[in-house]
Image (tube, rainbow, N blue to C red):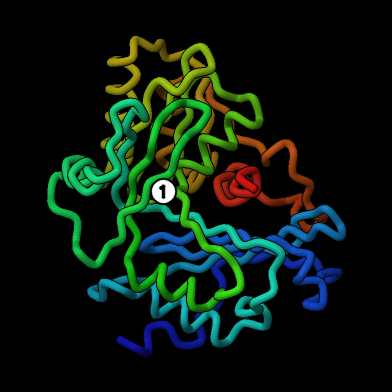
Amino acid sequence: MENLTLNITPSFEIKDDRFDTNQIADCHLLIEVSRDRFRFTVYNSIYDLVMWLEDYHVFSLLNENQLLKTLKNVYQNHQFLAANYWKTIRLSVNANHFTLIPEEYYESNEAAKYLNFAAGRNISEKEQIIDFRFSRFGAVCIFGIEKETITWFKEMYPARKIDPIPVIGTLIEGIVEDKNNQGLHIYFEDYYITIIYFKDSKLHFCNRFHFRTSQDMVYHVLFVMNELGLQTDTPVIFYGEITSFSDRYIQLGQSLSNIKFALNPSKIRFSQYFSDLPEHRYYSLFSSYYLY
């Protein structure tokens, strides 16, 4: 098993050769992790630009903590990731389970019960349960991250405060900050979709669904739209792991008539090296910058 992460290389990367490791103290490091992904980007405040991006697949197989093994390998062999003098560090977690609770009903000592109910089982004792407050909506997002993973990050960056936030949080905050908080938004992962609906600029619905086939995925989308009373011409914005030539896009396009892909967060500038980047793919990672 140990050999699975040797000599790991990014599945995708963009590098601006103007970036210098001597500039790290003036850079924000934005990190996003999940069970099967590790990605990061560097926002350089000297140039006021996003200048670096690397994306890694984590091949979990039967090992529960392959993410941590992959992280250790990448950091050990990376030219600057382990530097401990970043201006700020933001860690986003794409948790396997999360739930949203209205703030007026939320009791912090009941967080584990809320998450257990959402997961349909008791969350492993290996996970640390964390809450994230949506101040704009009066809601609290409860999610989990493996204790070993968050402990490792805090030990890796002892000079910086590491407060994990949920990927759903960065996504929603980005949508609101970019003033796109109307209509339906769908965030795609390899085998999950998160459906978000805003009504009258307020968060009205948010849930994550597992699927095995494109047909399953289309069913979830159409079922939610029917429950919300939405027509098939409702504006829908796509984020994450989807392309215009993928089977899931083609099948959704047969039912939905008003689809578009998300653009990069509007208040963030990018190096010219990012000009060919599919803008919707890393929206959640980039929009974590909004939470500074």
Left or right: residue 268 versus residue 185 is: right
**Residue positioned most to the left:** 121
Up/down of 231 relative to 259, above or below: above
Up/down of 261 relative to 282, above or below: above
The quadrant where residue 23 appears: bottom right
Left or right: residue 128 versus residue 74 is: left
User: Three-letter amino acid code at disc 1?
Assistant: Glu
Left or right: residue 186 versus residue 16 is: left
Dot 1 alpha-carbon crowd within 10 angstroms: few under 14, some 14 to 19, many 20 or more? some
The quadrant where residue 46 appears: bottom right
Up/down of 282 relative to 151, above or below: above
Identify the residue at image location x=30%, y=39%: 99
Label 1 SS: loop
Left or right: residue 158 versus residue 289 is: left
Identify the residue at image location x=49%, y=19%: 202
Where the N terminus falls, by quadrant? bottom left
Identify the residue at image location x=29%, y=43%: 108
Count of labels shown? 1
The quadrant where residue 223 appears: top left
Q: Name the residue under label 1.
A: 189
- Asked if one can make out residue 16 in the rendered structure from this viewpoint, the answer is yes
Residue 22's spot in the image, x, y percent? 82, 77
289 or 256, which lies in front? 289
Up/down of 47 relative to 112, above or below: below
196 or 212, which lies in front? 196
Residue 4's spot in the image, x, y percent? 37, 84
